[in-house]
Image (spheres, grey):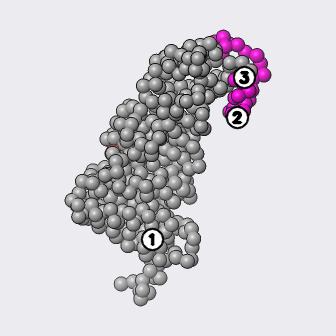
C-alpha cells in the first residue's frame, strides 16, 4: 500500500498567510475545512515522516531549519514552505525562495544531503518548476524498488507513438514514442540498457509479427545478448565495423527511396506491412562512433547523421544506447531528441544526456543506486521536468518467448513487387 492511499492529504500549516499564498500558487488539493493542529498532523504522519511534518508545518521549527542550514537569518529573512503534500514517495514541499537565492543553491548535492540528515530521511531531491519557487521532494519510499514484470499480452494494434516500456513512479505506464522520435538511452554497465531495448521490442512485438514494424539491429558486442533478436529482424549485423556501418548505409539508401515514394503524396505516413516503420537499434553505439578507425568513424557519422536527420517523416526510427553520453561518443546527440537517462556515475554525465541544468529540473541519474537497474529519468513530451521511471524486467524466459512469438509472419507474394510481374 502506498503512502498516498493510507494517509489523508496534508495541508500547509503556518497560518493564514501561507494558506493564501498557497492558493495563489494553485494548490493540488482542496483546502482543509476542519481546524487541525500541527500535533494532529504529526500524530497522523507515518513514522518516517513525522520529523519532516513537524519541520514544515510548524513555522518556528521551519525557521530553525533554514537558519541551521544557512538559508537565512533574522536580518536577511527566510524562505517559506507554502504547501506540503503527501506523494507516493513521501512529501512534496513547495518553498518560496528568499531573494538572492538560485535554484542551484538548493539542488547542490551537499545541500540536499544536509536536508536529508536534518529530516532523518534517506533522500531529498529538489526541482524548480517556476522561477522563485523550489519543490523539495522528501523521499522515504522507492515505489520503483521492486522490478515490474514485462507484460505478456500486448495489444495487436499497439500505438507506435506510445510503446509500453515500463512504469512511472506513480504506477502509471511509461510509454515511449518510437514512431516520430529517435531515442538515446545512456547508462553505466548493468544499468539496464539491454532490458530497456527488450522492453521496447516486446511492446512492439505484435507489430513486428504483422510486419507493421521492420526491425534492423546492429550489435557491436558480437550478438551475445541481442543475437536472440535475429529471427525478428530483416537485417542483423554484429561482426565487423564494415558490416555494421554497411547496414546503416544500406538503411539510408532505403530511407531515401521511401522519402522519394512518399514525397508530395503523403504528409504523415501510417505504418502498414506494405510501408512499415523501420526501427534501427544500435546497442553500444560508441563502438562505432568513437572506438573504430577514423575512416570507419567518418562513414558511421555520415550514415548515422543522414538516418537521424532525414528518417522521421518517412518512418525510419533509431533507438541507440551508450554507456557514456559524451560528445565524443554521441557526436550527433542533438538529433536524438528522446533521452532516457539511466544510472550514471557522474553528475556531468547527467548534463550530457539531459542538458545543462537538468539536475535543477529534476534529473538525478547520478543518484540511481546499483540495486535498481532499469530505473531512469525521462522527459515526457509537453511536460516540464523529468519523470522517474523503471523499464520492465526482462527474464531469459521472456527473451525466448519474444523470439518465438513475434517472428514476422511470411508475407504473401505480391506480383506488383516484381517489375516484370512474374516471380522468378
Ligand atoms: N528493468 C529492470 N528490472 C529489474 N532488473 C533489471 C532491469 N534491467 C536490468 N536488470 C538486471 O540488471 C542486469 C543488467 O542489465 P542490462 O540490461 O544487461 O544492463 P546494460 O545493458 O546496461 O549493461 C540484468 O541482467 C538484469 O538482471
Ligand atoms: Mg547491454
In this view of the protein, which residue sits in the foreground, 116 or 25?
A: 25
Using residue 323 as the reference point, say whether residue 262 is left or right of it: right
In this view of the protein, which residue sits in the foreground, 118 or 157?
A: 118
Q: CA distance from mark 3 to mark 2?
A: 15 Å
Label 1 secondary element: loop
Work out which quarter of the rendered image holds the N terminus and state it.
top right
Q: Mark 1, residues whose alpha carbon is within 10 Å: few (<14), some, or many (≥20)?
A: few
Which residue position holds label 2? 26
In percent of width and height, residue 378 lies at 49, 44
Mark positioned earlier in the residue sequence (3 or 2): 3
Please identify, in this view, whether the residue under mark 1 or under mark 3 is nearer the observer.
3
Work out which quarter of the rendered image holds the C terminus and state it.
bottom left
Does the magenta portion include 203? no
Label 3 secondary element: helix
Check contact, mark 1 vs mark 2: CB within 8 A: no
Q: Is mark 1 within 8 Å of ligand 2?
A: no
Which residue position holds label 1? 411
Q: Mark 3, residues whose alpha carbon is within 10 Å: few (<14), some, or many (≥20)?
A: few
Quadrant hosting residue 253: bottom left
Please identify, in this view, whether the residue under mark 1 or under mark 2 is nearer the observer.
2
Mark positioned earlier in the residue sequence (1 or 3): 3
Which residue position holds label 3? 17
Q: Which residues are magenta?
A: 18-46
Looking at the picture, does residue 351 appear above or below residue 260?
Answer: above
Q: Residue furthest top?
A: 39
Q: Residue furthest right?
A: 33
Amino acid at each position: 500500500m502506498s503512502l498516498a492511499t493510507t494517509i489523508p492529504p496534508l495541508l500547509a500549516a503556518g497560518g493564514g498567510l501561507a494558506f493564501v499564498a498557497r492558493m495563489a500558487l494553485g494548490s493540488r488539493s482542496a483546502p482543509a475545512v476542519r481546524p487541525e493542529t500541527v500535533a494532529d498532523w504529526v500524530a497522523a504522519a507515518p513514522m518516517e515522516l513525522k520529523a519532516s511534518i513537524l519541520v514544515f508545518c510548524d513555522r518556528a521549527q521551519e525557521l530553525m531549519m533554514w537558519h541551521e542550514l544557512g538559508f537565512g537569518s533574522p536580518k536577511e529573512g527566510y524562505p517559506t514552505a507554502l504547501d506540503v503534500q503527501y506523494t507516493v514517495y513521501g512529501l512534496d514541499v513547495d518553498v518560496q525562495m528568499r531573494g538572492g537565492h538560485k535554484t542551484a543553491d538548493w539542488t547542490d548535492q551537499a545541500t540536499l544531503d544536509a536536508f536529508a540528515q536534518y529530516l532523518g530521511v534517506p533522500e531529498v531531491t529538489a526541482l524548480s518548476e517556476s522561477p522563485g519557487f523550489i519543490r523539495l521532494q522528501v523521499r522515504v519510499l522507492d515505489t520503483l524498488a521492486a522490478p515490474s514484470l514485462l507484460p505478456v499480452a500486448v495489444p495487436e494494434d499497439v500505438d507506435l507513438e506510445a510503446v509500453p516500456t515500463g512504469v512511472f513512479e506513480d504506477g502509471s505506464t511509461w510509454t515511449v514514442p518510437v514512431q516520430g522520435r529517435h531515442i538515446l538511452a545512456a547508462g553505466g554497465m548493468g544499468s539496464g540498457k539491454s532490458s530497456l531495448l527488450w522492453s521496447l521490442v516486446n511492446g512492439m512485438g505484435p507489430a513486428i509479427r504483422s510486419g507493421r514494424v521492420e526491425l534492423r539491429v546492429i550489435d557491436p558486442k558480437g550478438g551475445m545478448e541481442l543475437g536472440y533478436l535475429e529471427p525478428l529482424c530483416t537485417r542483423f549485423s554484429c561482426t565487423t565495423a564494415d558490416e555494421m556501418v554497411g547496414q546503416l548505409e544500406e538503411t539510408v539508401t532505403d530511407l531515401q527511396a521511401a522519402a522519394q515514394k512518399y514525397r508530395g503524396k503523403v504528409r504523415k505516413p501510417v505504418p502498414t506491412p506494405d510501408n512499415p516503420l523501420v526501427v534501427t537499434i544500435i546497442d553500444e553505439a560508441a563502438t562505432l562512433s568513437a572506438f573504430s578507425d577514423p575512416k570507419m568513424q567518418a562513414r558511421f557519422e555520415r550514415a548515422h547523421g543522414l538516418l537521424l536527420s532525414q528518417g522521421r517523416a518517412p518512418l525510419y526510427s533509431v533507438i541507440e544506447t551508450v554507456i557514456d553520453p559524451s560528445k565524443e561518443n554521441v557526436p550527433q546527440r542533438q538529433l536524438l531528441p528522446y533521452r532516457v537517462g539511466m544510472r550514471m556515475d557522474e553528475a556531468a554525465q547527467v548534463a550530457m544526456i539531459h542538458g545543462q541544468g537538468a539536475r535543477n529540473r529534476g534529473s538525478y541519474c547520478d543518484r540511481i543506486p546499483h540495486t535498481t537497474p532499469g530505473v531512469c529519468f525521462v522527459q515526457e513530451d509537453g511536460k516540464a521536468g523529468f519523470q522517474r521511471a523503471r523499464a520492465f524486467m526482462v527474464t531469459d524466459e521472456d527473451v525466448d518467448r519474444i523470439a518465438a512469438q513475434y517472428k514476422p509472419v511470411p508475407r504473401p507474394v505480391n506480383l506488383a513487387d516484381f517489375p516484370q510481374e512474374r516471380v522468378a
